[in-house]
Amino acid sequence: MSKSKTALVISAHSADFVWRAGGAIALHASLGYEVTVVCLSYGERGESAKLWKQEGMTLEKVKAGRRVEAENAAKALDVHDIQFFDLGDYPLELDREAKYRLVDVIRAVQPRFMMSHSHYDPYNTDHAYATNVAMECRMIAQAWGHNPGEKVLGAPQLYLFEPHQTERMGWVPDTFLDISDVWDKKRAAIECMEGQEHLWDYYTNVAENRGNHFRRNSGGQAGGRPARYAEGFQSVYPRTVDEL
């Protein structure tokens, strides 16, 4: 594992990292982490309805607009590096070359933790696919026989961020992160996503609800921390501890 503090977020589309992990990104950036975001696609076909309703819109114009939105959001969140793979969406597909490209990023970043989507999403299979790819590429990055001589990956936790309709996704959070101190940054990033304005207040409400869950699980009325905003995550791999 790298001695520097690093993290990697693998986002199926160019807005996903904002709604679902923007607080975690901004908070860890404030703690000295270099957070890299990989957008596998721009979400140009399936998640840009507002742009497509404009007269004279083209695929390249939509992608350009989505890129600007994501870059502005990344700046608001103090993202260290944002990379756009431009692999297309609906459906999102990665061939072996694209997977190895992601492996190269994982090995270069040497993240202390990674983030991606829920395991299952019947409304948007791009999301679950991105996580399957993240797990596969994490595995490849750990393999000593892949590009021998490179620094292999350790065992970073993969956190699955919250999907849009949790009761249909089998997503069960086991970690709540207080993002109150960086909420203004997340809200600013949310408002950069002009093509999906209908989600701004939705994800504000999600953060408020998760703040309630943080308060309850940190002690509630018996002394819980007064978090106003939080994000929830589901961990994939076991944690190793010396005491509970």
Image: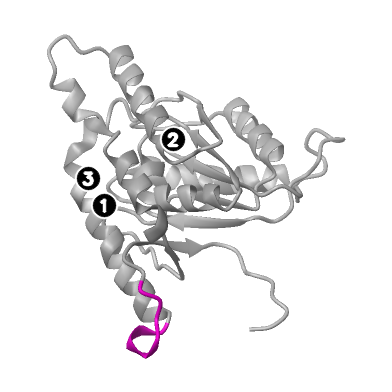
Asked if labels 3 and 1 touch by Cβ distance under 8 angstroms, the answer is: yes
- Gap between marks 1 and 3, in whole Å? 6 Å
Residue 99 covered by magenta stretch: no
Q: Main secondary structure of the magenta part?
A: loop
Quadrant housing residue 141: top right
- Gap between marks 1 and 2, in whole Å? 17 Å
- Gap between marks 2 and 3, in whole Å? 16 Å
Looking at the rendered structure, the secondary structure element under dot 3 is helix
Front residue of 93/63: it is 63
Residues rendered magenta in the picture: 219-226
The residue under the point 73% across, 47% down is: 153
Q: Amino acid at mark 3?
A: Trp
Q: Position of residue 19 (x, y in %)?
A: 33, 46
Q: Is residue 189 left or right of residue 238?
A: left
Residue 225 covered by magenta stretch: yes
- Give the answer, above or below, for where 188 lies relative to 83: below
Pick out the residue farthest to the bottom.
222
What label sits on residue 74 in the rendered view? 2
Q: Position of residue 1 (x, y in %)?
A: 75, 51
Q: Amino acid at mark 1?
A: Tyr
Q: Residues within 10 Å of mark 2 (few under 14, many from 20)?
A: many
* Mark found first going from the N terminus, 2 or 3: 2
- Give the answer, above or below, for where 56 lies relative to 134: above
Quadrant housing residue 241: bottom right
Q: Residues within 10 Å of mark 1 (few under 14, many from 20)?
A: some
Q: Which residue is mark 1?
A: 203
Q: Which residue is mark 3?
A: 200
Q: Amino acid at mark 2?
A: Ala
